[in-house]
Image (tube, grey):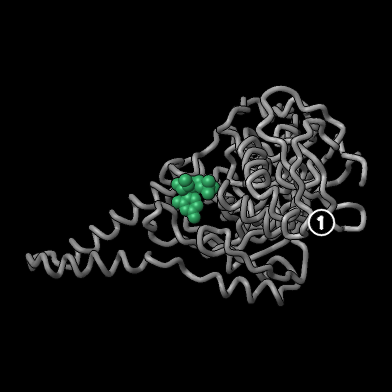
Amino acid sequence: MMASMKYVKALAPGKVNLALRVGASRADGFHPLDTVFEALDIYEELEAWADPSGAITLEYDLAGFGADLPVDESNLAIRAAQALRERFVENGMRTATDKGNAADCSDKSCSAGYSCGEGDISGECISRKDEMGSDSPVSLSAACFGAHMKILKRIPIAGGMAGGSADAAAALVALNSLWELGLDRAELAEIGADLGSDVPFILMGEIARGRSRGEDLVPLSSQCPHGFVMLINPEGLSTPAVFKEYDRLAAKRALLAGDNDTRGRGSSLLRDQAKNAEMAKVSAPNSTAELCAALTKAQEVRDIAPYMGNDLEEPAFSLRPDLREIAQKIRELQRRDTNMGAGVILSGSGPTIAVLCEPHETQSVAAQLQLHFPKLTMLCACGPAQGAGVCSEW
Ligand code: C5P
C-alpha cells in the first residue's frame, strides 16, 4: 500500500460566461439556463494538510482583496469537504464489499498512520486505490478524514467569476487526493452540483455549454484562444439578488404588455392573454446555439463577439446603474477604436465586466481602460483554461 499523503496543493480556475441565457424561475427557485462557460487562467490555489484530529478547518490568504470571508459551515470549501467525507463514509463499505474483501475493522489504529482518538465516528473498513489503481482495503476511521485547508484567493469575491465555486472545486480535488478516495471526475461533479451550479464546470474547465441550472455540461471546442480584461469592481453583487431582480423585471414587462394590449378595450381576458404570452417568452432560455457554432469556426475573437449576450445584464444594471455606465462607455470606446477589444459582457451575475480581446492585446487594452476607469482594478486573463486539478502532493 502506498504511503499516505499528508499535503496536497490544487488549483481551480475562475470563469466567464460568453453567453448566459436565462428562463423563468422553476418550481425549485432556480432558473433554467443555456450558457457557454469559459474557464480563465486566474486560479484559486488551495493547500490541504491532513489533520489527524478529524477536524475540517480553513484559512484564507486574501492577497489584498481586503474583504473578510467566513470560514465556517457557510463556506463552500468547508461544505465541499464535509460533503465529500459524508458521501465517502456513507459509501465506504461499498467498494470493499463489491470486491468481496470487506472486513470487520474495529481497529482504532488508522493504517494511514494516524492514531484516531476519542470521538471517532466509527471504525470502517474501506478501500483505497494503490499505485496500480486496484482497490486495497485499509482500516481507516471516519474521523481520520480531517484536513486543514488554506486558500490563496486570486478570483474576485462576489464578482461573477465563480470564486466560491472554484474554492469548492479545489477542495473536492485536493481532498479526494489527500484522503486517497479515488473518486472520479463524474462523482466529484455530482457532489459539486449540490454545492453550487458552477462547481461541475469549474471541475471540467476549458469551454462548455451548460444547461439546466448550469450543471448539465457538454464540452465545446474553440479554434482560437480568447483574451479578457476583467474590470473588477470593489463592491460585490449577490447572485440571488440579481436573479430576483430578473424575475421582478420579467413580471413588470408581462404586466406592461398586458396593459398596452388592452388599453381602451377594457378586456381582462385580453390582458391575461398578453401577460401569459410575455411570460411564455421567458419560460425557456434563448438558445446559445449560434455562439456554439461560431466557436467551432472562429479564427479570431471578433468572430464570436456578435454572439455574446447575458440576460442578467439588465437586472444587474437595474440594481447597479454604475455598471451600465461602464459597459456603455466601453462599447462606445470600442466603436471608435478597434484596439479597445472586440466585445464587452457582464461576467455571470456581475459586477465584474469582461472585455474580450485577442490574447496579445490584453495588457494594452487594460492600460487604456485603466485611464478611463481609475477606480477599478484590471485583471488580464486568457481562456480556455484547464479545470480544477492537483498540482503537487507529498
Ligand atoms: O447554484 P448557486 O449556489 O450558484 O446559486 C446561487 C443562487 O443563484 C441560487 O440560490 C438562486 O437564487 C440563483 N440561481 C438561479 N438559477 C440558477 C443558478 C442560480 O436562480 N440557474
Q: How many marks?
A: 1
Q: Nearer the viewer, residue 216 or 66?
A: 216
184 over 175 or under it: above or below = below
Q: Position of residue 163 (x, y in %)?
A: 65, 42
Q: Residue furthest front?
A: 104
40 over 6 or under it: above or below = below
Q: Is residue 167 left or right of residue 312?
A: right
Q: Position of residue 32 (x, y in %)?
A: 46, 61
Q: Position of residue 331 (x, y in %)?
A: 57, 55
Residue displayed at 70% across by 54% down = 203
Residue displayed at 79% across by 50% down = 127
112 over 303 or under it: above or below = above
Residue beneath label 1, please?
Answer: 360
* Residue type indicated by callout 1: His
Residue displayed at 75% across by 23% down = 117
Q: Is mark 1 within 8 Å of ligand 1?
A: no
Residue displayed at 69% across by 29% down = 120
Q: Position of residue 371 (x, y in %)?
A: 68, 39
Q: Is residue 349 visible?
A: no
Q: Residue furthest top?
A: 118
322 over 278 or under it: above or below = above
Q: Nearer the viewer, residue 107 or 315?
A: 107
